Amino acid sequence: MNKLKFKNGDEMPAIGLGTWKSKKGLVGEAVDIALHTGYRHIDCAAIYDNETEIGEAFSRVFSEGKIKREDVWITSKLWNDSHRKEDVIPALKKTLKDLNLDYLDLYLIHWPVAFIKGVGFPENDREYLSLEEVPLQETWEGMIEAKKQGLVKHIGVSNFSEKKLNDLISGSPESPEMNQVELHPFLQQHELLAYCKENDIHLTGYSPLGSSDRSDAMKAENEPSLLEEPVIKRIAEKHNASPAQVLINWGISRGTAVIPKSTTKEHIISNLKSDELKLTEDDLKKIASLDRHFRYVTGEFFETKGNTYENIYDE
């Protein structure tokens, strides 16, 4: 299994199990299956509203004694309503309680967007906090404090543009160790990848398969399908692999981590085996031609009358 190495020597498996959109009643079993079939990286978040069930799975698996807590990389994320410095650690402790853990391997600021306390998704402008009221730098100070207290081993961000990363780095003694963003052949983000490599920031790609199980409200009309893309399908056929395995391996080949989500045992196992695939230079060249800067996760779900989502990615 390919791994991403951190400055202190810690290593994160390049393929993890994503849990966004994994439904209650299914997600615990998916985590159980993943851990027992070789996964050692699980990606979570408070807003996914399934961390309690995931925590039950962790307790069940770790109590068996065959898989140790310290052998599994577990990530979670700070939601947008806890961006004030004093709210970061309480939110983290809630996640740790839900996941039945003493610490996280990685904790991320989920979005560069701030809400008032208790808001999941804003329904009006009043439920937002501006980045002048709660600067990202303030939130980052809370993350650094969480690391100092030993509640997390590594800290980072998610959905941050190069500009926002640069602003954060320039005003802090400690840089993010990870940026989790949407990455796939239709959204290759070469400039962001190069910037992160230059600044020793790892990248994790979410929605690597196109997130086709998103709600209809989040989908664009006639959006393209990664799994049905002819170039991907031809490469998969050549290697006797699935399109999903090609997409996951493409992410690994770029030196990034990939967190495909599934609650189906067959897919969970198949996704992990993507690591065994060997894409050729010709394969990679063909995949490179697919870039169209298409986002499946636009951020539009954050839009209210006075707040647009378009500046989230600084594009």
Image (spheres, rainbow, N blue to C red):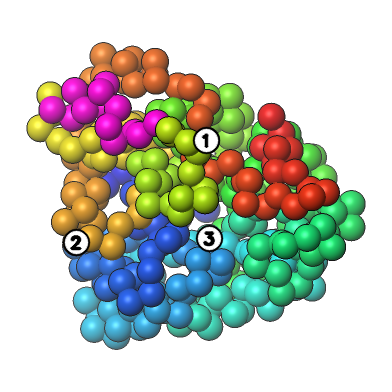
Q: Residue at x 24, y 83 (%)?
A: 64
Q: Decide which of tag 3 and tag 1 comes sooner along the chain.
A: 3
Q: CA distance from mark 2 to mark 1?
A: 28 Å
Query: Closest to the observer: 222 or 98?
Result: 222
Report which residue position mark 3 lands on: 106
Query: Does any portion of residue 222 appear in the rendered image?
Result: yes
Report which residue position mark 2 lands on: 265
Label 2 amino acid?
Lys
> Is 315 on the left-hand or right-hand side of 259?
right
> Is residue 96 positioned above or below 291 on the image?
below
Query: Closest to the observer: 87 or 23?
Result: 23
Q: Which of the image's four quarters has the C terminus?
A: top right
Label 3 amino acid?
Leu
Element class at badge 1: loop
Residue range of the region highlighted in magenta in the rendering? 224-237
Report which residue position mark 1 lands on: 295
